[in-house]
Image (cartoon, rainbow, N blue to C red):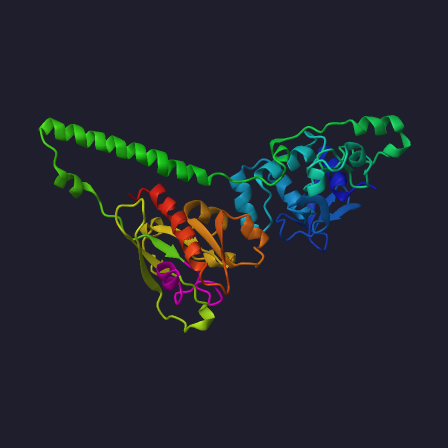
Amino acid sequence: MSSVLAIVRDLLRTKKDFKLTNKDGEPVEDIVAAKNISFGSKTTVFSLDEVTDFEIEGEKVPLRVVIQCWLHRGSNAAEYLADCQKKQIFNVSFLQRTGLLNWLSGSSGSLQISKPKEDERFGKKSPAAAAATNGKEGEKTGNGYSTIPSNGENNDVNDDPVLREALSRERVLLDHNSSLRGNKPINFSYLIKDAELKLVQSLKSSLHSKKGSHNDSSNGRVSKSADSSRQVPRKDPIILIPSAASSVFTMSNIKKFLQDAHYVNPRDIPASQVDLVRVEKKFDRISRPIRFIVVNNTRMFTKPEYWDRVVAVFTMGHKWQFNNYQWNTPQELFQHCKGYYFHYAGDVVPQHVQQWNVQQVQLDKNIRFKDIEVVRFFWNSLERELIARGYK
């Protein structure tokens, strides 16, 4: 029997009329209010909550996600993402959505629906064994991906020795994701910011210095006092930490850790009533000591310039922490600010945190002499961030 996804694909390819209906069978426009999708007549009806063969990060997605992609086949990535966020529907990444739409429209003959297992990714399973694992949902290809056949049917290779031999020698065409041993696209857009800070600003600085040097030489003298007067002093950078009492770092223990390299469990000391502490640090590659402002909320961020001063964000791994931030999604936030996820050694890092652009830092829960090494690692990492932002 063909899978639901293969049947839906055949109906969409033939441009079969469909409509979204609620639980009473009445047509609706909003996919959130819809419960079913019907094609042609009411005899061909599928539940939008039915799980399909299409997998993302090891989880099979419901038909609702697939139909949402199809409804937005003519939309750009920003429009699709905005509508998914508005309706609170899981959004498929750009590359996966493109592959899904190509398969649904018939432009592509097969669809990668699951991530290869470790033993299959590194060639421990032969192509012949992979070809022989055909099932109802599709066939295992040489690269370990499960694919849905283009006609939605299942060929029994065991009954045809010639076909079985041909499939054992088949070599699957790889796209750039599968050739890199994975199917999860990685967003490198944060590198644009680094390039701008490191390249563009350095070019601007060199041009300004050349211009100033030319003006001084034309006057026959160099005015150091004038150069220093043109330098605008930078305001203290800001470090944001969580406001939750269950956080690894709170306002009661953060200063002792950053300044004295000693970690104290916040449960062992009284809770602090302040919302701001200051920590000063002298770096090797920055000419003057930097004084940091550490805060656990954004209530005092009354001007947009405060967000420009945020150089580090400590996260517990909960998205609600970013609700009142200027960038309230981890994907966008950690492209603008350096992110850190501190956790105790031995604790499992949540899967969604591993996908964020954050630096994972381990703390030993009982051995305190290791704190010096952890603090040194943090400051070295933050020093690179400050230099990239133009601190000298």
Q: Quadrant of residue 170?
A: top right
Task: Left or right? Give the position of 173 relative to 184.
Answer: right
- Residue extending furthest right? 159
Is residue 92 shown above or below 215? below
Where are the magenta residues, as a range?
241-261
Q: Whole-percent x and y of residue 221?
A: 9, 31
From the top left corner, tell me how far across and down residue 11 is, in percent: 74, 37
- In the image, residue 49 lies at what x, y percent? 70, 52
Q: Is residue 258 magenta?
A: yes
Would you say 192 lies left or right of 83 here? left
The answer to whether any part of residue 144 appears in the image is: yes
**With 102 as the anchor, is 338 left or right in this view?**
left
Residue 78 or 93: which is nearer the viewer?
93
> Magenta region, mostly helix, strand or loop?
loop
Residue drawn at (63%, 49%) of the image: 31
In the rendered image, the residue lying farthest to the front is 369
Give the percent coordinates (x, y) of residue 232. 22, 45
Mark yes or no: residue 325 visible: no
Q: Quadrant of the C terminus?
A: top left
The relative height of residue 270 versus residue 92 in the rendered view (above or below) is below
Q: Residue at the spot x=47%, y=71% of the render?
A: 267
